[in-house]
Image: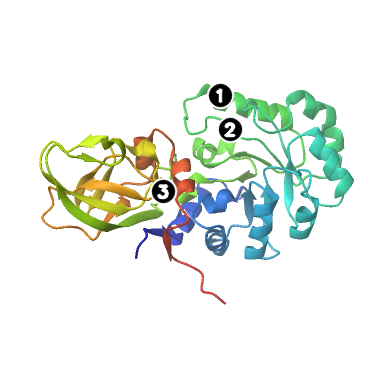
Amino acid sequence: MATGTLHIDLEAIAANWRALDALSAATCETGACVKADGYGLGLTPVAQRLHDAGCRAYFVASAAEGLELRRALGPEPRIHVFYGHMAGDTAAIQRADLVPMLTSIEQLTRHFEALPRQPFGIQLDTGMNRLGLKMAEWAAVAEIALAADPVLVMSHLSDAEDPDCPRNAAQLARFHEMTDGIDVPRSLAATGGTLLGPDYHFDMTRPGIGLYGGRPHVRGEPVVALTLPVIACFDIAAGEGVGYNASWTAPAPTRIATVAGGYADGLLRALQPGMEVMAGPVPCPVVGRVSMDALTVDIGHLDADPEHVTVLDAHHGVDALADGAGTIGYEMLTALGARYLRKYRGLRPIG
């Protein structure tokens, strides 16, 4: 193949969902966050495998994502939309039977006027300052909003990946202050909040990154592996430069492999310097700049030219790769390019 191969283990995703589900009580439902094309791994195959594992509540960012998910899963599951009910979304929300998680008084007004019988949820801002009704806004509209029977009231933790951060407890206290006594299911925890323990679980958890093998679910099963084919191998002399602007100069004679994959495939330029790939069990440094379609790798220490190299595997996952780029596993995972051949383990048979 002239492109890399991204191996995606749907069985591992299902196992991670079951493991996170087991952390909460039987009375607490475990949903799944599948936004951004199932965190870059394919919305339809990911959601279908989660459905087969028992998941019945899903979270996406936009109504367009919700429409695509409804086509994949059919009428049964509940599909919640984090962007809420934006202008222009009414037809999609109604057609796909979506649950907009309303984020503002403006959205509450729009939804009640346009789709008064359509299920909805409410987002509250407990301190993240991103989306949701603030304390004073909620106090002003809570009676009217609750009388319309929302199906879920939620908020989002800003620091759940750090269990020692005092903002977690502060947001938990604020969520209690804003919602205690209401007769509506509540949700505060994504992956990090699920791991913080039962005080954060309420009636539903909604894990995301933990399903896909990322931190903070460090006990999760690895989900992705990435191999890249070698295009060409050649020798260079000491003092020769490699790649754009000759950013790396060979200190001694060596051999270089040019590999099919670059920043157009989600391998960020920020991975250099310091990136390594594996030729079998042997690490090989990436030298020169990451370019759009290619990496150059020093293979002078190998006994033979490799046919391919591995970028991601069970021992070097998206978080380790992200650390090298100074970013987070979420970004690495969702950036993995569309050019890869995707091979799935546990794919639902067609038909």
Does 136 appear above or below 41?
above
Mark earlier in primary sequence (1, 3): 1
Q: Left or right? Give the position of 274 relative to 340.
A: left
Residue drawn at point x = 76 percent, y = 44 percent: 85
Residue 156 found in image quarter: top right
Residue 203 found in image quarter: top right
Q: Secondary structure at mark 1?
A: helix
Crowd tier of the residue under label 3, counting other residues whose Cα lies within 10 Å: few below 14, some 14–19, many 20 or above: many
Q: Left or right? Give the position of 206 relative to 246.
A: right
The answer for how far apart the CA atoms under marks 3 and 2 are is 21 Å
Asked if the residue at tag 1 contacts the one at tag 2, i.e. Cβ–Cβ closer than 8 Å, the answer is yes
Asked if the residue at tag 2 contacts the one at tag 3, i.e. Cβ–Cβ closer than 8 Å, the answer is no
In the image, 223 versus 207, the foreground residue is: 223
Residue 98 in sight: yes
Residue 280 in sight: no
Question: Measured from the top left, where is residue 323 in percent x and y?
Answer: 36, 36
Residue 218 found in image quarter: top left
Q: Amino acid at mark 3?
A: Gly
Q: Secondary structure at mark 3?
A: loop
Does 334 appear above or below 196?
below
**Dot 1 corresponds to which residue?**
167
Does 269 appear above or below 174?
below
Q: Secondary structure at mark 2?
A: loop
**Dot 2 corresponds to which residue?**
157
Q: Amino acid at mark 2?
A: Leu
In the image, 324 versus 132, the foreground residue is: 324
**Dot 3 corresponds to which residue?**
220
Mark earlier in primary sequence (3, 2): 2
Q: Left or right? Give the position of 216 relative to 351.
A: left
Residue drawn at point x = 52 percent, y = 42 percent: 191
